[in-house]
Amino acid sequence: MRTALVLLFLLALAALPGALLPQRSLNAGKVDEFIAGNGWWGRLLDDLEFFEVYGSVWFSAVYLLLFVSLVGCLTPRTFEYAKSLRAKPVLTPRNLARLPHHAEGETTRDPDDVVAEAKRRLKGWRLEVREEDDGARSISAERGYLRETGNLVFHFAMVGLIVALAVGKMFNYEGQVVVLANGSEFCNSGTFAYDSFTPGLRVDGTELDEFCLKVDGFAANYLPTGQADHFRADIRYQAGEDLANNTWRSHPLEVNSPLRVEGNRVYLLGNGYAPVFSVTFPNGEKRTNTTQWRPVDNLTYLSEGATKFDPPGVTDPAERRTKQLAITGLFAPTAVLDGSVLGSGFPDLRDPAVAVDVLRGDLGNESGRGQSIYEVDQSMVDSGRLDRVARENLRPGEQVRLDDGTVVSFDGVQRWVYLQVSHDPAQVWVLGFAIALVLGLGTSLVVKRRRLWVRATPRTSPDTGPDADPDKAGRTVVVLGGLARTDQAGYGEEFRRFAADLLAELAPDDEDEARQDVTAGRKT
């Protein structure tokens, strides 16, 4: 147990870097920025896996050692507990007056009646009635075994929680995807359908649970200050037999109210705007593109992005790389102009506008390197292979004409939603073990182990001496003792109440009060 406690402390200590330092799994950009800003110290922390704490070798070692220690601690305790459940309550001590709690009285009833009355009042206690050598009869009673039960449940639940979390990390996955709220569809058919995907150790993305959903619309309510009040995405989904029958079911998806389908949870994480641009090329062909732009101000939803076009009908790669177009800049849902500089005054669509640069040339799409959909390859601009040919502020319906006759139009705006699909087959087990852990801990803290003994001894001869009372011959001396196995708090009052009630019930009928000597409390 001491080893387990030390390892538990080490686990908490090892988790501190995960809370204080940026983690690569959550924000790789922040990690790179931290390393670049701290020189050799940042590189050393990176070598020691401080930016991947929960997947590091040393954290896993403490984690596994704690698991082994808990199992090694619980195994003998479980056998001891099972043995104690089958064992009888301990023998009645010879001198009950030496216990922290004791009481004494006399009655005209015989020992059998005393034992019967005590047994009736000790309902729910584990009892053992014994005959003693001097003709006395005694009861040994114990209560509070649930304390150890709760303690074992707590520790077994902790082991189960560790196992469930490990299983979840092996078979879980999370994926994020942006879907336009114009009836666009997303299907959980493979990793290629996601914008980003984080698989578990045993997940390769080829056997995902099949379901599809469509985002038909998105509604947002804002307070007058611009703070978000409520988000709702109107979606339809199909899974299981619905896929074969092409049946769609409606569901309002809200923040912190996920859609649960096929063992997956679909969360609404964010939203934004996607400007719609049309390009009419000199030959008369028209292309329309809707691409999500990312918010750079989460309060006003001022957004930035890049919408890219390939020229139609151009099959020569070299010629195509000289005529590609990119529309980059800022979008404001509620335009606020400071001269010619565009800003946004409110997150809702009240007066949308864009401030764009139109670039023509080689976008670098055929370089074999991945690039962000929100921006162009700056190296193409720096090398002169991508030139700015126009700069303009536009509102819906307005357009700008380029020097070669190409017309770029700002047609309007659509909404997009940012969804996360989470799958964790051990989630229910984690919840169950967490509840069992809390219940076990609460039980072990509330329930107290205590013991109580009652001895009824018949008087075989009257008292002697000047104050002797011959009428006491034939009476029964009742002695009670109590002992708390753990914390004494509260047991003294329980013992006094039980002793007073029992001795009052057994008091002789010819006396107004039984002579009682009740001492409750700790001896020093």
Image (cartoon, helix red, strand yellow):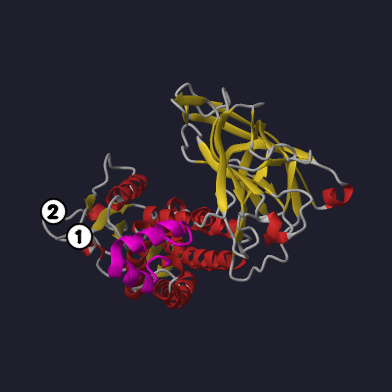
Q: Main secondary structure of the magenta part?
A: helix
228 to the left or right of 254:
left
Q: Is residue 338 above or below residue 482?
A: above
For residue 231, say whether it is visible: yes
Image quarter of the C terminus: bottom left
220 to the left or right of 54:
right
User: Element at badge 1?
Assistant: loop
How crowded pointer 1 is (Cα within 10 Å; few <14, some 14-19, many 20+) is rated as some
Question: Do the numbered discs 1 and 2 sit on residues whose CB atoms are within 8 Å?
Answer: yes
Query: Which residue is at a point 62% across and 34% down the rendered structure image?
Result: 232
Query: Which residue is at a point 72% across and 55% down the rendered structure image?
Result: 188
The residues colored magenta run 23-52
User: Element at badge 2?
Assistant: loop
Q: Which residue lies under the disc numbered 2?
A: 467
For residue 125, say whether it is visible: no
The foreground one among 431 and 315 is 315
Image quarter of the N terminus: bottom left
Does 367 lie within the magenta span?
no
Residue 389 at x, y percent in the picture: 58, 41
Q: Amino acid at mark 1?
A: Asp
Residue 316 at x, y percent in the picture: 75, 59
Quadrant hosting residue 339: top left
Q: Amino acid at mark 2?
A: Asp
The foreground one among 265 and 217 is 217
Query: Which residue is at a point 23% across and 55% down the rendered structure image?
Result: 470
Q: Is residue 298 above or below residue 436?
A: above
How crowded pointer 2 is (Cα within 10 Å; few <14, some 14-19, many 20+) is rated as few
Q: Is residue 63 above or below residue 265?
A: below
Q: Which residue lies under the disc numbered 1?
A: 463
